[in-house]
Image (tube, grey):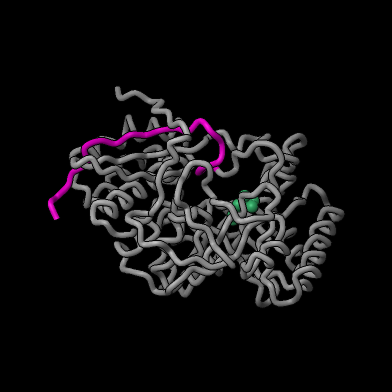
Amino acid sequence: MTERRIAQVRAYTVGAGGGADYHDQQGYHWIDDHIATPMSRYPGYEQSRRSFGLNVLGTLVVQIEADDGTVGFGVTTAGEPGAWIVERHLARFLEGAPVTAIEKIWDQMFRSTLFYGRKGLVLNVISAVDLALYDLLGRLRQEPVYALLGGAVRDELTFYATGARPDLAQQLGFIGGKMPLHHGPHEGEAGLRANVAELAAMREKVGDDFWLMWDCWMSLEREYAVRLAGAANAYGLKWLEEPLIPDDYWGYRDLRRQLPPGMLLTTGEHESTRYGFRMLLEMGCADILQPDVGWCGGITELIRISALADAYGALVVPHGSSVYSYHFVITRTNSPFSEFLMMAPEADEVVPMFQPLLLGEPVPVDGRLRLPDTPGFGVELNPEVPLVRAVARS
Ligand SMILES: C[C@H](O)[C@H](O)CC(=O)C(=O)O
Ligand SMILES: [Mg+2]
């Protein structure tokens, strides 16, 4: 293959809601309906995550154009600050470099941003660039990303669903349902009882064998989490997800030892890089790691995180991220199933996660999906969604 070089990098924000910033929804949506969060303790921020600014960043789209005009793209949650980082800082490591220099470009982006990066927004941006590079390489080679990653280890993906209605997810063929936790510790014993009553009612609806999990979205304290897990055990809770803030590695380590036997502890969607996941693994913080490929450092870093996890006997079940996760999960034996985020406002039907931004996004049918072999990640930007190149080059 002729060696292609990167001609131009472009960063865009997106006018419409949704897309990679999937919390940015209008009107009623289960994903913003009194979900327990680290901010719930402050009056006025309990009912809606949008109220404390969960949707302030918006979507970032990174396009990378090769010198033959082929364009790959990646998306993340980073909006205008992310566009600034791409255009004013990271572009220098990309433009003129070989398209195949993915490892070197990653290393340069990471090292050059250490003085203000390491986690969070900067890693979201590095992830989007990395996804765009993989998409571009796949398009140039006319191969799906999963083929670039060594090929599929199984024929199809199997999914659990995240949403407010595991009972409907069961009817739609998913293997389990992960519900948001609705009441945080600030709601006291009554809130704890209300949480357990919701779980009990859902168990009644789905029967004994369907997986039920709780996503606590960093909202709990350890003592509360122990009591909640103890009460939930009677209703067969499969895992307790992200109960503590991400930096409390010590809390996760201790909590994992205090959970009822058989109940799993999961976390990682707000963790990034191999260094963050090394902490989780070495300290024994979780049974299942849940990196988000759009936030943890992209495919390049997820490969390292997954290998590290495998050596520790931990599963990696990436957080959401649709096709960007699927192309990875299908290639890894320690990623036996996938998450599907139910983005229908009532969680009552399967709709593409990144709508309206992407076209061609495949969705599970009967809880399963055979990945198409379309080049790259197999999705296109929807021309009807306006993109804004908000940051001029200096
Ligand atoms: C449902 C959760 O609160 C969050 O919005 C998504 C998430 O953490 C997950 O899918 O996992
Ligand atoms: Mg989660």
In reply to whether residue 14 is colored magenta, the answer given is yes
Observer-nearest of 334 and 154:
154
Up-down relation of residue 219 to residue 258 (above or below): above
Left or right, 130 with respect to 19, comes to: left
Image height of 50 relative to 268, above or below:
above
**Residue at 45%, 56% in the rendered image:** 323
Q: Is residue 258 visible?
A: no
* Magenta highlight on residue 31: no
Q: The N terminus appears in which quarter of the rendering?
A: bottom left
Q: Residue at x 62, y 39 (%)?
A: 25
Where is residue 238 shown, x and y percent of the image?
66, 70
**Is 252 left or right of 386, judged from the image as shown?**
right
Write the start and end of the magenta stretch as one range: 1-21
Q: Residue at x 52, y 35 (%)?
A: 57
How many marks the image carries: the answer is: 0
Find the residue positioned furthest to the left.
Answer: 2
Q: Residue at x 29, y 22 (%)?
A: 394
**Residue 162, position in %: x, y?**
63, 58
